[in-house]
Amino acid sequence: MARQRAPGPAGSSAVRSAGPWHSPPSRGDGLARGDAREGLATPAFRPAPHRALCTDCGVSRLANPRACASACQFIRPDYAASERAVHGRARDTSTDELFFGPVQAMHRARLKAPRPGAQWTGITTRIAERLLETRAVDAVLAMVPDPADRWKPVPALITEPAAMAAARGMRMGYAPLLALLEPARDRGHRRLAVIGIPCQVHALRKIEAGFGFEAIFVIGTPCSDNTTTESFHRFLALLSPRPETISYLEFRADMMVELRFDDGRKTLIPFLELPIADLPADFFPLTCRTCVDYTNALADLTVGYMGGEGEQWLLVRNSRGAELLALLGDEILLSPVTDRGDRIPHVKAFLENTRRAAGGLPLRRMPKWLRPLVGRLMPRFAPKGLEFARARVEMKAIETLLHLERHAPAKMRHMVPPHVRAIAARYGLRSPQAAAGQPGTTASTSARASAAGTPAP
């Protein structure tokens, strides 16, 4: 599938896709209920049929729900082919692209003037604003909060730059973003921007060509272990006696969780003091425990935090991503990424705990009296910058293999890409077949596996 340039404003790009699926016209535009904010519509969608390992990306709610079979990343993903279709090449596994996917450039970044209500400084929503301001797109597909619950995500079709302010901040939960594709097409929009998490972006890349859009720009955010909105409220209740007053939560790269409250207070909680062990086993659904695309490798531009060491982390993946970043001009401050510390002992400890959890064994808890001390020392010795980002990707690869083998072993052969198996193999997660060099094999979590494993260089 060749990439093409499409006519239109400077910085535009043609829609690309893998797969032959085409979307038939839907019945009406699906906009059964409208948001009161001008330039923002929140459609009503068809009910979602039951799917195993489903994050409700929205494909199952389209007129042709059978598209899930070819679009879903939890069935038979082919990241090498998808990367070639989107970026013109697959990742170079001899470099850091093994962990992060195809990249042209990486930056630490922040807006000079942070936007009110933004999770960090507002880079993602400001780029979308600029796309609307310059008429590079007709509409942006993004998430806004439910009017009755600030944490619940609601898919929104945004057509006015000022309305992007509603999309600032973090939501926690699942929402069918891609179900907006039909209303967008039926309203006559030809050029779109999509802000999505990895499972949404993977599916989008598989079906986008069937809609006939002139251009789609994709701004991706790394996944951060999603859960249902209801479960997230239970987590907040463990963090504060008045969880309804928490207005902001962020897992930071310095091993701290930052909370902000409606009255202006701020609180930092070390990771080690979080009540993770008190959460139910299904708090993070199996989909999120087995995600193989933590860094959103199929986006044009990934905007996250892991490699930013206190700032945002930008991964420009192709020329379209460079065009998106250029829209900010001198509004943004860029600096080189950092790379410090040693991730290996942290990943090994994670491997052992995850092996116990995946096997149904209780986690080894640190004594309560020791947690505050260690929790405050950890940021001094933890990996930072790109080393922290590598650690998180390795942890996700380990988690994926351990939980799949425990809960869905039949899916391992086709669901886990070769680069994820290669990452996990560095820590001793090898099956006998893989050791023998047979294709399509994955890791084993048998008792023979060493907690130390084979460390990465």
Image: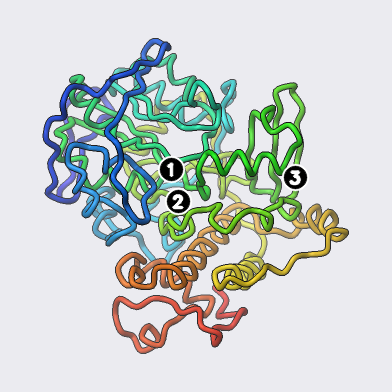
From the top left corner, tell me how far across and down residue 429 is, in percent.
49, 78
The residue positioned 64% from the left and 37% from the top of the image is: 249
- Alpha-carbon neighbours of circle 1 within 10 Å: few (<14), some, or many (≥20)? many
Q: Identify which residue is drawn at 25% across, 30% down.
A: 12
For image coordinates 41% across by 21% down, the residue present is: 129
- Give the mark nearer the N terminus: 2 vs 3: 3
Label 3 to label 1, Cα distance in Å?
27 Å
Mark drawn on residue 356: none
Residue, disc 3: 269
Amino acid tagged 2: Thr
Give coordinates of residue 282: x percent, y percent: 53, 56
Q: Which residue is tagged 2?
A: 295
Q: Which residue is mark 1?
A: 302
Towards the viewer: 34 or 138: 34
The answer to whether 110 is drawn above or below residue 283 in the figure is above
| Mark 3 element type | strand
Asked if residue 11 lies left or right of residue 261, the reply is left
Q: Which label lies toward us, 2 or 3?
A: 3
